[in-house]
Image (cartoon, rainbow, N blue to C red):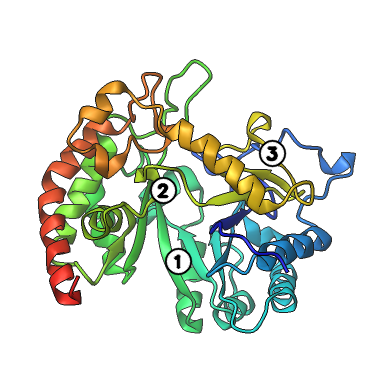
Amino acid sequence: MTHTDAQFQLLIKPAGSRCNLRCTYCFYAGNDRFFASPSEGRDKTMSLETLDRLVNEFLSYRMEQSVLCWQGGEPTLCGLDFFKAAVEAEKRHGVDGQVVGNALQTNGLLLDAAWCKHLAEFHFLVGLSLDGPRKLHETYRGKSFERVMQAARTMREHGVEFNILCVVSQANARHGAEVYEWLVGQSFNEIQFIPAREVAADGSAAPFSVRGEEFGDFLLAVFERWYPRDVGAVNERVFNSLLSHFACGEPNLCTFRARCGDYVAVERGGEVFPCDFYIQPEHKLGDLGERPLAELYTVAREGFSRLKGQVDPGCRECEWFPMCNGGCPRDREPSGRNAHCAGLKKLFAVAAPKLEGLARQLKRVRGF
């Protein structure tokens, strides 16, 4: 039995960057091109042997909570039998009383009744990609709207817990109020708004990327409808993170925390990286079985703590710095300033006083 003081999660890409959609803004597409192709003896999906070794080692650490997040590309391309094997491996290698959680990020295209029965039975938390009403959703995601909505209906029928992953891009950046009201109108009350930003070799932002103030303007339009009407009824990850800052002293979203996330990313062949945004050869930490995952996590945490701290000197003088900590390193401009800084400042100026007051109310109610 192995023990570790480290508490971390796994972001697992069992199908690599393979997907049954080709969304224009996808940052995953082709990011495993650095590895051997199937014709060179590398499987298109994670082998059951690699799966078993991964689960075995991870659960052997006996952490307070062992969370496996299955991502892509599109992880459902591995097939339902793969995920049944994953659960069986968790049963086999876990011990009585051990808390094991599974999360699945998906475009929903393959989620039928059989899938949803399994996801509900074993309490998978599902993140379903949906960018708003049909016209906005299909701008960059192809003709997928009806199948995504059907997936949502099927998950509800089977009692699957899921949230909505809404990418904010040039398709919907100026429609924050419309997107939010539509999602709420569909009774989606767990929402994550995620900015699209990819940068070309010359440093220019891709055409679909949200720029400057746009992401903040989008969130501000949402906030003005969320507060106070939907507080407690609808959860949105940026607002929850800011509320956590005031209630607990630290944002709970890795984007805004002082150090990067408590996880490592595992590619389909067992290659280990510090983050799914940084799956490039220069960031590879090692291979499964080469060194303990807990050791690789420690290496990642130390390295990315330094990366997180490389911000524009002016950032640390900003009144909002404790709320954003310079944002995610991948969203920074060459100066070290977050590309969405201007917009986030506008959001914080309006939202911070209200969320600080809400945090005080929560503390009084809970006796903090």
Q: Earlier in the sequence, mark 3 or mark 1?
A: 3
The secondary element bearing badge 2 is classed as helix
**To which residue does mark 3 refer?**
32
**To which residue does mark 1 refer?**
149
Q: Please say if 100 is above or below 31.
A: below
Q: Which residue is at the far top?
A: 202
Look at 42% across and 42% down and name the residue there.
259
Of marks 2 and 3, the one in the foreground: 2
Residue 168 shows in this picture: no
Q: Position of residue 338 (x, y in %)?
A: 33, 30
Q: Is residue 155 left or right of residue 35?
A: left
Look at 37% across and 56% down and name the residue there.
192
The quadrant of the image that shows the C terminus is bottom left
**Tag 1: amino acid:** Met
**To which residue does mark 2 refer?**
254
Q: Earlier in the sequence, mark 2 or mark 3?
A: 3
Q: Toward the viewer: 85 or 225?
A: 85
Q: Position of residue 233 (x, y in %)?
A: 24, 72
Tag 1: Cα neighbours inside 10 Å, few (<14), some, or many (≥20)? Answer: some
Q: Position of residue 136 (x, y in %)?
A: 36, 48
Residue 263 shows in this picture: yes
Q: Please say if 235 is above or below 341.
A: below
Q: Which mark is drawn over residue 362? A: none
Tag 2: Cα neighbours inside 10 Å, few (<14), some, or many (≥20)? Answer: some
Q: Give the CA separation, mark 3 to mark 1.
A: 29 Å
Q: Give the CA separation, mark 2 to mark 1.
A: 29 Å
> How many numbered tags mark residues here?
3
Tag 3: Cα neighbours inside 10 Å, few (<14), some, or many (≥20)? Answer: some
Of marks 3 and 1, the one in the foreground: 3
